[in-house]
DNA sequence: AAATATCATGACCGATCAGTCATGGTTTTG
DNA sequence: CAAAACCATGACTGATCGGTCATGATATTT
């Protein structure tokens, strides 16, 4: 009940004992989709409310109003539910980052670089807004040790941290940023953006929502030195 | 064994059935302290390795090599261990923030403000360096839902977020910062600092450690507009 | 040294855990 | 419509959970 209105997460059934019957519009197929979604939805709500590690399979099936055996028809264990939940968002994020990588690698001036960042920001915003609850889950569990059912989340966090460094290094090579260590710059920006996002998605009042991107952009631009005044402006 | 060399956490026994015998130098007193420290040490290591929610009391007593009953002699439950672990750090952080609050409230020019921030930075650094593992625990569990044994950590995180806003508002009132919403500015800075710190404490290579504070200071100063050029410089 | 208070210990309890499986109902296939 | 494949169900198992408690050992007090 704590969770607000939301789309059912987009997840798919997993096993195929020997080709499933009535693939397309069949009753079976519809039921499978419905159950998978019910499990994912119940799990996501519980994860957000108590944290992944505190949720048992019994909790999930109780909330989803299905039998325990059915859970194991669709998922091997809790970690596979987590995996299924984040998959679509992770894919979208990867594509956005790949595209930004290319754009930055090709950038030769300030405008191209800023454009690449803006495009990335837009693509990531779209992915986040399409899946706010999954994003909240990621932000909540982001620093989990990689043990147990939270392994997929920890791995995604590591991937994002790493890609952020790569991205910053690329911009750095062009001499478009201040001469700070890209690893530090990247961690700073990721930390700032994610914390802001987490608070916004968790219902903290941060003032007018539409002002946030602008403020954030200004902070980053002034802070790390993307700007027409050029890199290395040492005051 | 995952955890590096470290001080035993400073924690104290809790109950006092009717005044403890031989308070000062007694054998009893020494045993009590030793056991309490053993429990806290074992728990902290496990918490960092697997996450608080994934650690059972049995895990803790097995690692601390004590009987289960002894655990309950010193702690009511897991959440009290968490509470005991973070208490000293929380107290230090509170004092530093209180002092900074006063300093900022009294600041009337740029130098006083920057000095207040520098003093705060130093005090917090000292607290962190004195308790790196507890700090890692806080950063790791910072966004936990406030259910179960992680409640003290979630509350501390909320307190820090709130105090950061208060601090920023005070500086803001003096017109010493850019005209951004203090709630956004505060969340940005907290997010950046904490993420950087988490990565540093978790063993990520961020380049020369002693360069980080300088970079961070520059990012914050340029980003949020603390500086002799004055507030509201709208480019 | 005897009496007393404190304390460590691990067996024990009922609840809950993850995961399995025999049963019976339902959909698809031929 | 009959045979076959699929699948929902919830009882069941053995392990583990948080928490308690009777027992015996140890330190303190008198």
Image (tube, coloured by chain):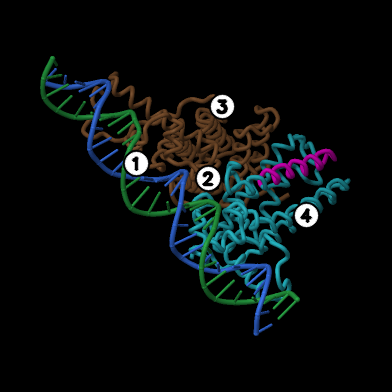
Chain colours: A cyan, B brown, C green, D blue
Residue A132: image x %, image y %?
A: 62, 60
Q: Residues within 10 Å of mark 2 (few under 14, many from 20)?
A: many
Q: Are marks 2 and 4 in contact (CB under 8 Å)?
A: no
Q: Which residue is mark 3?
A: B4
Q: Which of the 4 quarters of the picture holds residue B25?
A: top left
- The secondary element bearing badge 4 is classed as helix
Mark 1 surroundings: few (<14), some (14-19) or many (≥20) residues within 10 A: few
The residue positioned 68% from the left and 56% from the top of the image is A87
Q: Secondary structure at mark 1?
A: loop
Of residues B217 and B158, the one drawn nearer to the viewer in this rendering: B158
Tell whether position A162 is magenta.
yes
Do badges 1 and 4 share one subunit?
Answer: no
Q: Is residue A198 left or right of residue A227?
A: left
Looking at the rendered structure, whether the residues under marks 3 and 2 are on a common chain is answered as yes
Q: Position of residue B170 (x, y in %)?
A: 51, 46
Closer to the chain start, of discs 2 and 1, is 1
Q: Which of the two marks, 3 or 2, is nearer to us in this view?
A: 3
Residue for badge 2: B142
Q: Which residue is mark 4?
A: A95
Report whether mark 1 lies on the same chain as mark 3: yes
Chain on which label 2 sits? B
Which numbered disc, 1 or 3, marks the residue that appears first in the sequence?
3
Q: Where A2 sits versus B171, above or below?
A: below
Give the alpha-carbon distance from disc 2 to disc 4, as whole Å: 29 Å
Residues marked 2 and 1, same chain: yes
At 57% from the left and 45% from the top, the residue drawn is A148
Q: Are marks 1 and 3 in contact (CB under 8 Å)?
A: no
Q: Residue at x 77, y 35 (%)?
A: A179
Give how far apart the Cα atoms at labels 1 and 3 are.
28 Å
Residue B2 belongs to magenta span: no
- Check disc 1 and report the residue beneath it: B76
- Nearer the observer, B208 or A48: A48
């Amino acid at each position: 009940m704590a969770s607000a209105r939301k789309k059912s997460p987009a997840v798919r059934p997993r096993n195929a004992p020997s080709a499933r019957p009535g693939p397309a519009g069949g009753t079976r197929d519809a039921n499978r989709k419905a159950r998978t979604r019910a499990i994912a939805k119940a799990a996501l709500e519980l994860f957000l409310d108590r944290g992944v590690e505190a949720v048992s399979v019994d909790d999930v099936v109780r909330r989803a109003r299905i039998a325990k055996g059915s859970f194991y028809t669709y998922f091997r264990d809790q970690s596979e539910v987590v995996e299924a939940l984040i998959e679509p968002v992770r894919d979208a994020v990867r594509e956005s980052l790949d595209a930004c990588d290319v754009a930055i690698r090709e950038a030769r001036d300030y405008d191209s670089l800023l454009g690449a960042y803006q495009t990335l920001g837009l693509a990531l915003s779209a992915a986040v807004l399409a899946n706010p609850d999954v994003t909240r889950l990621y932000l909540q569990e982001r620093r989990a040790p990689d043990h147990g059912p939270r392994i997929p989340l920890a791995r995604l966090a590591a991937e994002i941290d790493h890609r952020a460094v790569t991205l910053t290094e690329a911009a750095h090579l062009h001499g478009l940023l201040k001469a700070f260590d890209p690893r530090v710059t990247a961690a700073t920006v990721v930390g700032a953006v994610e914390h802001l996002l987490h608070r916004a998605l968790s219902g903290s009042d941060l003032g007018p929502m539409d002002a946030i991107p602008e403020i954030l952009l200004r902070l980053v631009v002034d802070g790390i030195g993307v700007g027409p005044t050029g890199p290395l402006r040492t005051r």
